Amino acid sequence: MRATTIHAPGDIRFEEVPDPRIEEPTDAIVKVVAGCICGSDLWPYRGHNDIDPGSTIGHECVGVVEEVGSDVRDIRTGDFVIVPFDHCDNTCAHCRAGAHSACDELGFTESGQAEYSRVTQADGSLVATDGMPDDALIPSLLTLSDVMATGWHAAVAAGVRPGGTAVVVGDGAVGLCGVLAAAQLGAERVIAMSRHEPRQELARRFGATDIVAERGKEGAERVAELTGGVGADAVLECVGTDQAMKTAFAVARPGSTVGFVGVPHGVELPVRRMFQRNVGLAGGMAPVRRYLPELLDLVTSGTIEPGLVFDLTLPMEQSPEGYRAMDERRAIKVLLQP
Amino acid sequence: MRATTIHAPGDIRFEEVPDPRIEEPTDAIVKVVAGCICGSDLWPYRGHNDIDPGSTIGHECVGVVEEVGSDVRDIRTGDFVIVPFDHCDNTCAHCRAGAHSACDELGFTESGQAEYSRVTQADGSLVATDGMPDDALIPSLLTLSDVMATGWHAAVAAGVRPGGTAVVVGDGAVGLCGVLAAAQLGAERVIAMSRHEPRQELARRFGATDIVAERGKEGAERVAELTGGVGADAVLECVGTDQAMKTAFAVARPGSTVGFVGVPHGVELPVRRMFQRNVGLAGGMAPVRRYLPELLDLVTSGTIEPGLVFDLTLPMEQSPEGYRAMDERRAIKVLLQP
């Protein structure tokens, strides 16, 4: 098949690789209908993560089940499925407690920007739609494989509740989905920290009531002003850098929680400040499967349209250009079609 | 008056100092009936914190109100009161949200091991008992000024819920109160990590169902065995060292929360592990006033007897010996009587 691969920082290719195949009786092979590029794909692209040269890259996709292993019971060939980036059996003690991203049988999508992708624990991982979805729904369904579920997890972990004020640090696609999640979970005021006008606009469309363009200390002061000096009831940290984490703790009111979903890179947590102000930290890698039924309902009913985060659609063979566009922040998020 | 003072690491004295006096109209002066030594007093005693030579030390006491400022309305001369170590107005936005330890008018008890102590924000801070309590109740009432409220905060922050498994890291007085709190909040299984037999015994009396004497990696393995490889539903970190924090994260199941109340010293939080396993951190300096009404009920009704943490009672002038006894772990916690 043809797949997106990474050979070195900045060196993304779309090339022929061996087809994925059923390796375990619990596997399924999905023919990708749409894949996309994740902010976390930029970590190796920018040289911040180790690279296995020539390996496939991409972990977000939706598609049609092409083949299933002999132990797969609930998912069938021909099903249109959401593929969570983190695969799970949905039955172990961790999954039963909602911690699907720590499943005993945890696996990951390894070729989401390709023609086919292997899914482990297919019955546990995959959620099928009712029949074939309209083309118009595909972008929003695709976000459920990671970015929307991750933004949702940030809001849940931060303890967003009806009536409160939520601050979202980060205006990437995850941050924007975090805005949508916070608004959907009932936050009365959603403050998006964003400097980029097109992203500010989308944040407003997703439910942001206020935009703070300032960063760092100035940004925190602006949030303090907006919250009468009290700080936010819930903070979503959707970047993963030390700067973003510092900002998150600076705007959190005493007794609140920072929900974090950005893969931490060089983050040093301010434990003394956390102690003195009783600001907690929760979150981590999103348990996508946990939220899928609820989010699928919200998307299919038209209640939310997270697919709006895609502002560039390319044929899959142009995935290298997709990476460049995201790296240069010319695009918020890039959708790839085989 | 006579008060306990600290002059240098290891140099505790009981000596004449100026009487505390009403400085603000919201102040009260309390004649101390009983004070005690806190594990956190050992930080400066052991040279880990800066010392202002000759300053009074001690922040836990109960007593009788001797004098009130002109703006004090609810608390009256002659009331027997619990003095939270952290004073608060109980009316600001942070107090209303239960984050009393970040009160806009935050103050601290500065001479709890002395004959008199000044309390700021007396109406907000103090809780009076119904008349004079029996002598037998004094030790338990005294624990409400800090240690029991702090153990309770650890359990609340860790999210202890009926039916689950709680692990308590630390067998100091706070840890033991954490055991009592976890049991009281309904944990079905309370695992106390303790190597010292008298402390193990008290932990059992407070509701521990299991004792793990091993520490570090072995301790974590033992907890894993006890929890069927899953880990604890809630973890109380009641020490404040990096080792204790590492143990806490090692025994926490994915999706759970470590409730921390030990003043952090040299702690580096394992942010990557927290992310990968979705283990959160919450807690900090205890909002004592928040829990006082509830805890006072539990003590006066005889439901809990946290005063059992005191295994040494000394006349207050022997406070230097009290410090030695706690430093050498000859005593769990020392009660001082003027």
Image (cartoon, coloured by chain):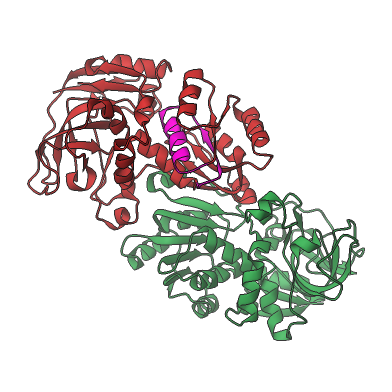
Chain colours: A green, B red
Which image quarter holds the N terminus of chain A? Answer: bottom right
Q: Is residue B57 visible?
A: no
Q: Is residue B98 visible?
A: yes
First to last magenta residue range: B161-187
> Relative to A266, is A205 above or below?
below
> Residue B171 at what x, y percent from top left?
48, 27
In the rendered view, would you say B103 is above or below B218? below
Spot occupied by residue A150 in the image (x, y as percentages of width and height) = 61, 64
Asked if residue B172 is among those painted magenta in the image, a careful observer would answer yes
Q: Nearer the viewer, residue B61 or A155?
A: B61
Looking at this view, name the residue that lies furthest to the left.
Answer: B70
Of B239 and A247, nearer the camera is: B239
Between residues A213 and A301, which one lies in front from this camera angle? A301
Q: Position of residue B285 (x, y in %)?
A: 38, 42
Residue at image x 69%, y 85%? A136
Determine whether, in the image, residue A246 is placed left or right of residue B92.
Answer: right
Position of A301 compared to A195: left or right? right
Q: Relative to residue B217, is residue A33 depicted above or below?
A: below
